[in-house]
Amino acid sequence: MRLEGRRVVVVGGGIGGLAVALACRQHGAEVLVLEQAQAIEEVGAGIQISPNGLCVLDALGLGQGLRDRACIASAVSLRDHSGGAEVLRLDLSRLAEAGTYHFVHRADLIDLLVEAVRASGAQIRLLQRVVAVRPGAPAQIDLANGDRCGGDLVIGADGLHSAVRGALNGAVAPVFTRQVAWRAVVPNLAGHPPEARVHMGPGRHLVSYPLRGGAQVNLVAVEERSDWVAESWSHLDAPEPMRSAFQDFAPDVQALLGAVERPGLWGLFRHPVARVWQGEGVALLGDAAHPTLPFMAQGANMALEDAWALAACLERDPQPQALARYQHLRRDRCARIVATADGNAWKYHLKNPLIRSAAHLAMGVLGRVAPA
Ligand code: FAD
């Protein structure tokens, strides 16, 4: 094991950071995770784990744990907002390996990862906010509490506002997309089937899918707006603005909205994919490298892919070559996914009724002729 005896410090204990901590530990590294929060936890919301993400969880030995906690998705259904008519249905049982697309509560996925990281012998330290990183051999880290530490490799898995990304790329100002998203988890009172429903309306869309054995439904609702909202889920909203933004949506959507209590509200910002993903003793992954809009459900799946790819590169080659190869393997793929997610909003949000009808017709035809 090439990583044996090497000290890896992971900044950030989200899905990407925990996955890379486990992957590096499994390759023999001594691993320390520094997390700024006082507990590693996720506020209530769901996440879609697609076959690419599941492959990584399987390789980490966590696939069964995910399956035990998740609902298997049978389809993705795109619907017109008002009558709720189905425009396009992607039957996921036609995937080469059926049963590989899942809906899981984020808290359940985080618990699974934390348990595995701790059991692997990697250390997780809480209340450790990294304020500066200096590439080098070893790379150096400054913490907000005045402490310093270093490692053979520092991995920046510190999300949207990454301090590590800043050290490699300088500061970049994100641009408000003029869209906000609410998210909420509600009881599954009306028997939402095990599918992701995208309800598409003019300037708005709402995604719903079940969680936790079908007991709950996850809602993400996006609306175009001109006023600015902070880029943080810690902002809670009253339920009325979310309900009124979607009041002309179909009755099944109204029933779900009726159960919303205190939704999270988030401003959606566009950040460029980082130009530089690695430097001497430093690498980036997940949202720190490629923040994405949530219109393809791929942010966490890409973070899982990054984690596996980075550990595999480090296992194969000496560190400088491994880091260069990692960036080469990952950057273009992630940039393509981020660009596709960017493009999805306007497809969901068409405002002109004639264009919307024509586009929905075309989507339906494409859905019928698309290969399995
Ligand atoms: P994060 O989850 O942001 O973790 C970063 C961690 O670093 C945090 O714990 C943070 O506290 C810590 N941290 C930050 N700064 C510091 C610091 N300076 N020092 C120490 N610690 C620090 N993706 C999917 O794949 N499927 C989906 O269905 C999906 N749905 C989504 C729905 C919505 C509404 C949104 C907004 C996103 C969605 N995503 C989805 C995207 C996904 O949530 C993110 O891409 C993913 O969580 C990124 O993981 P990460 O580990 O890179 O970053």
Image (tube, rainbow, N blue to C red):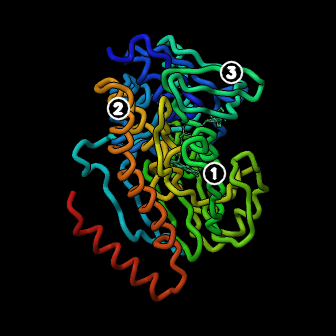
> Where residue 312 appears, x then y in whole percent?
33, 28
Q: Quadrant of residue 129?
A: top right
* Disc 3 target residue: 148
Looking at the picture, which amino acid does disc 2 mark? Ala
Q: Residue 171 carries which label?
A: 1
For the residues labelled 1 and 2, say whether their Cβ atoms are less than 8 Å apart.
no
Which residue is at 63% across, 74% downward? Answer: 248
> Where residue 21 appears, x then y in whole percent?
48, 24
* Disc 2 target residue: 322
> Where residue 163 appears, x then y in whole percent?
63, 40
Q: Quadrant of residue 269?
A: bottom right
Quadrant where the N terminus is found in the figure: top left
Quadrant for ligand 1? top right
Q: Would residue 63 be seen by someone viewing this image from the given angle?
A: no
Which residue is at 46% across, 89% downward? Answer: 354
Looking at the picture, which amino acid does disc 1 mark? Ala
Mark 3 vs 1, N-terminal side: 3
Q: Which of 139 and 277 is in front in this view?
A: 139
